[in-house]
Amino acid sequence: MQDFFSLSRWMPGLVTLLDYRRDWLADDVRAGLSVAAVALPVAIAYAELAGVSAVVGLYSCILPMIAYAFFGTSRQLIVGPDAATCAVIAAVVTPLAAGDATRHWQLVMTMTAMTGLWCLAASYFRLGVLADFLSRPILLGLLNGVAITIMVGQLSRIFGFTFDESQLIERLAATPDYLALVHWPTLGVSALTLIIMLLCRHYRPLWPSSLLALVVAAGVLWYLGPERLNIAVVGSLSEGIPDFQLPEFPPGLMRDLVLPALNLAMVSFVSMMLTARSFAARNGYDIDADREFRALGVANLASAVSQGFAISGADSRTAVNDANGGKSQLVSIVAAGVIAGVTFFLTEPLQYIPTAALGIVLVMASWSLINLRGQWQLHKSDKPAFWLAWITFISVLFMGVIPGITLAVLLGLFQFLRNVMRPTDQLMGMNEEGVVHTLGRNEEVKAIAGVLIYRFNSPLTYFNASYFKRRVLALIGLEKAQPNCLIIDAVSCFTHQDISVMSVVGELHKELKRRGIHMVMAGRRTQVTHWLQQAGIRVGEEGVLVYPDLYEALRMTRCYHTPAVATEMADVVRGEA
């Protein structure tokens, strides 16, 4: 009970801050300022991607970053707007809002709150294992597809026209028709922004290239006047703390957001965990997946309360934090303070930022997500993973972001079920030293005459028990001479009690007994004996023999009383001695 109410259980980040070391302060402040310099332009750009006002992107940074600093377990992770989450939000909310800007914003806040609630529910039920649910190949294909979708969608802002089509393939097909509609002043601003970012990254890689490019582009438009050039800009932004507003739309729209919010929670969490784990391993500490789920949920609720949109782990800003030597969650608090200062007191200069420049920032951010080479190289190492990645990638391009994410989740589920329902298995043998190994991998490992040692590489459950039985009987049928004894490695497959499994084991025992083959279980002796007896399967001389491990089973099984096997086992025992 004391542990339940402990501060370390609920707010591990705050515990780290309470034990703060003074010598970390300089590094944390420097890292916080660097993170803020990168986060400011990206937040504004992602707000445009999500279809809301630029200031909403800033709202989505302040409270969520502070909330994660208190509730998170990663000392390097920076949370905030993310390309994939904003693309999902836009894909879901835009058709539901039907062009109403106020409803659009309210739907975004509601979806963000739902995402936070899903994350808290997952944390309560200890579903942090879902961090491993979407395999890396599936997530690779998903992020590649989302990145290309975002990049194509920003072409209209960069070139100064408006797409009439809503899907990527249709937009690409219609691109030649739009070339005559290019607005050259807008394209010039886009080119200026791109050149500044590329030069900055090449010659001054530690400088905040996005922020510098936006400052220059906004300064040029302020001097020349955006109205005279007819270039779209962010426009005037509200200052200060936003007025709290309750959603005003039919409850039916909320039902339309429930499943998309679940998809968004899944993708945000998996992406965040990949970033958090990689930087935690680099800095020599562990993170707790269930607490990270809670921290992501609290951060999203904080974003919804501050009228922002859904957030996730930001890999680029986390990398900036780590590169500048950030030591603790104070980095997030410092960055949030800087962004809050800009949001509440310096929004007037932001109105001159051209949307074309934001489009370039988004394209560059999306470009960093693309890893088509890594996706292609999977065909050399893992063909099934290769096809999973490309199916996910193509589905996002052709079907859209939300159907693509749904398919990615289903593919992850099917991949798991396939591995459990049809796992690998091995026959085992012994080498000259009397050590049990898998047959076929080493010529020194030989099968024991009259004995079949079988390992099923998955927990036995109701949907793979029949396959287990078929595999055992099939392998026995492939033997040139029928074995006298079947030894099953119970450690790898008998992990929990299942009535269906015990029923199949009983059927298998009867079939083996009819053929004159002894059935032996090796490992988990106490549990397996209890489960067999509860299922009404006889254990002992006239039933299933159960031993603590494979070696004890090989020594003690009575089927070795046949002359050939007895001689071989005597040699094995002498070798071990």
Image: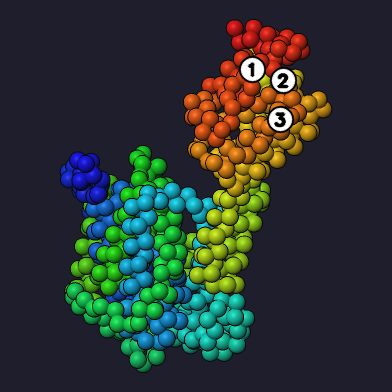
Q: Around disc 1, counting alpha carbons within 10 Å, would you say few (fewer than 14), some (14 to 19), or many (20 or more)? A: some
What is the distance, in whole Å, between disc 1 and disc 3 at their CAs?
15 Å
Badge 2 marks a residue whose secondary structure is loop
Q: Residue at x 62, y 29 (%)?
A: 488
What is the distance, in whole Å, between disc 2 and disc 3 at their CAs?
18 Å
Read off the residue under disc 1. Answer: 557
Read off the residue under disc 2. Answer: 448
Q: Amino acid at mark 3?
A: Leu
Q: Is residue 281 left or right of residue 70?
A: right
Quarter of the image for the C terminus: give it: top right
Q: Is residue 119 left or right of residue 170?
A: left
Residue 347 percent across, percent down from the top left: 24, 77
Q: Around disc 2, counting alpha carbons within 10 Å, would you say few (fewer than 14), some (14 to 19), or many (20 or more)? A: some
Q: Amino acid at mark 2?
A: Ile
Between disc 2 and disc 3, the foreground one is 3
Looking at the image, tell me whether mark 2 or mark 3 is earlier in sequence order.
2
Read off the residue under disc 3. Answer: 512
